[in-house]
Amino acid sequence: MPPAKTASGVRVGDPCVVIIFGASGDLTQRKLVPALFNLQTQGFLASEFGVVGVSRSEMPHATFREKVKPEDKSLPTDEARKAWSELSERIFYQAGDVSRPETFKQLKDFLGKLDAQLKTPGNYMFYLSVAPEFFATIVKGLGSAGLLEEKDGHWRRVVIEKPFGHDLGSAIQLNQDLRSVVGERQIFRIDHYLGKETVQNLLIFRFGNSIFEPIWNHHYIDHVQVTAAEELGVEGRGGYYDSAGSLRDMVPNHIAQLVSLVGMEPPISFHADAVRDEQVKLLRSIQPLSPEDVLHSAVRGQYGQGQVKGHKVPGYREEEKVSPQSNTDTFVGLRLYIDNWRWAHVPFYVRTGKRMPKRVTEIVIQFKAAPFMLFTRTPVSHLTTNRLFVRIQPDEGISLRFGAKVPGPVLDMGAVEMDFRYVDWFGAKPSTGYETLLYDAMVGEATLFQRADMVEAGWQMVQPLIDVWKALPPRDFPNYAAGTWGPTDADALLERDGRHWENGET
């Protein structure tokens, strides 16, 4: 039987049961169930569908349903409330300790009963919203219980949240542990940044528009900037963050994914492996950083006390569950080079940090300046450099900055922008950033998920920094005030090259 389709002709997600390990955690309530609810209201969930939360706490089904129920403001109409009622009837809960084999046997028995009740055909998506040390334990438990075996036409998939390892060696070991139990095509390593519309639009923008693809190379592009800035501090996650830091938390996954999508060669098709093959090639083309390169091309920082939007905030070492002597980085800035023809001598500057002036994730493509000789005898003192802004959050869109004549009798130039915002053109739909990823996992579309070699390539990129920074603890932490754009060394990283960070100033 062919897959069902929505009224607009789009394929509906396969009939299945989504099993969420770590269901009592914050992610389930804030992101996963709301994303499933949005898919329900938009018609993308099959009628044969169910959700099972798994966690250690004992809890009746009704209590779990109430725990994950969206806020009243998310249910403003009778139609929305009806949709939630229909979905909530298919949400269940199973208590269990993942370190005990009987947990998986009990889960298998329960899923068998649900298949009969919900008329689901045995398709299971196991979502691991748990601490990384439980990834291999859960997958091995599922394998031992026969829950990962695919037969009789049904599928079994495992969705894994980051962090996927804490360095290159641990990532390689985790991949080996998982693939000893389950096939690579069954593993969906999730990166929620790739659920953003603008990130996905990079492929369409680059390869579907003849205006930009011919100039997407070192002949026309001066440099690339990738920024992922957060206003917030660690927000109660001090225990995790103090063992990870900004480098491990953001660079080998989120930042590496953005760099690969900006820099990759055209794939032979939009098939998942064709796209991911090119992403891996790009990541492996990044020039390895020697220990000397780390000292000159990398900056780390940690925020101290400061002000964010007029409110005084504590320094990192004063945050809950953070050591008062912590040397954990909350800011990272890097200069990377890609050793291939397209990007020869074009620096990629990347930065990510906590407690910065605003929340913004964007990619800036700065094109080379036009020759100036035509303007030498005019009031124009400098030419506006063309910049392409790809805004990923919070205001998704794309804008192009270019020069135009200032009205009047004198020849003078000013900077103007053509601006595209998703909400203006396509309207606003409720979104958590997980809808596309969950839907793709239901239909087996793996393009937006990391493959094992992609994960390892990302860690390989940052391993030299991990090694050098471990051997040479910072002497100047905290070295930037909360509410600023990071340490002064990050500005110097570009200024030495005659460039500057794009901080949103016009």
Image (cartoon, grey):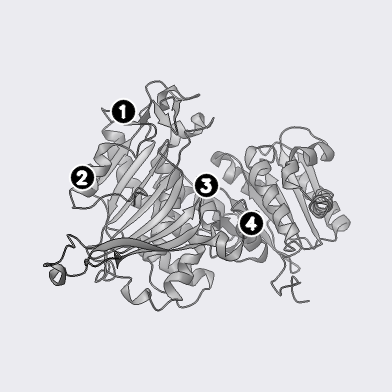
In the displayed structure, 212 sits above or below 145; it is below
| Marked residue nearer the N-terminal end (2 or 3) | 3
Q: Is residue 145 visible?
A: no
Q: Residues within 10 Å of mark 1 (few under 14, many from 20)?
A: many
Position of 99 compared to 90: left or right? left
Q: Nearer the viewer, residue 207 or 94?
A: 207
Q: Is residue 423 visible?
A: yes
Depth check, front residue: 231 or 207: 231
Q: Which residue is mark 2?
A: 296
In terms of sequence position, does the residue under pointer 1 or pointer 2 come before the other?
2
Horizontal and vertical percent for residue 308?
A: 43, 33
The N terminus sits in image quarter = bottom right
222 up-or-down from 329: above or below:
below
The residue labelled by disc 4 is: 435
**Position of 12 relative to 132 (above/below):** below
**Residue 250 in the figure: left or right of residue 383:** right
Instruction: Tell me the residue at 69%/37% (across/down).
Output: 24
Q: Earlier in the sequence, mark 4 or mark 2?
A: 2
Verify CB contact (< 8 Å) between mark 1 and mark 2.
no
Measure how far apart labels 1 and 2 are at the Cα level.
18 Å
Q: Earlier along the polypeptide chain: callout 1 or callout 4?
A: 4
Alpha carbons under labels 1 and 4: distance apart: 39 Å
N-terminal of the two: label 3 or label 4? 3
Q: Which residue is mark 3?
A: 162
- Residue type beneath disc 4: Glu
| Few, some or many residues within 10 Å of mark 2 (<14, 14–19, 20+) | some
Residue with the mark numbered 1: 477
- Amino acid residing under circle 2: His
Q: Tell me whether circle 4 and circle 2 mark residues in contact (CB < 8 Å).
A: no
| Label 4 packing within 10 angstroms: few (<14), some (14-19), many (20+) | many
Place residue 279 in its image quadrant.
bottom left
Amino acid on which the number 1 mark rests in the picture? Phe
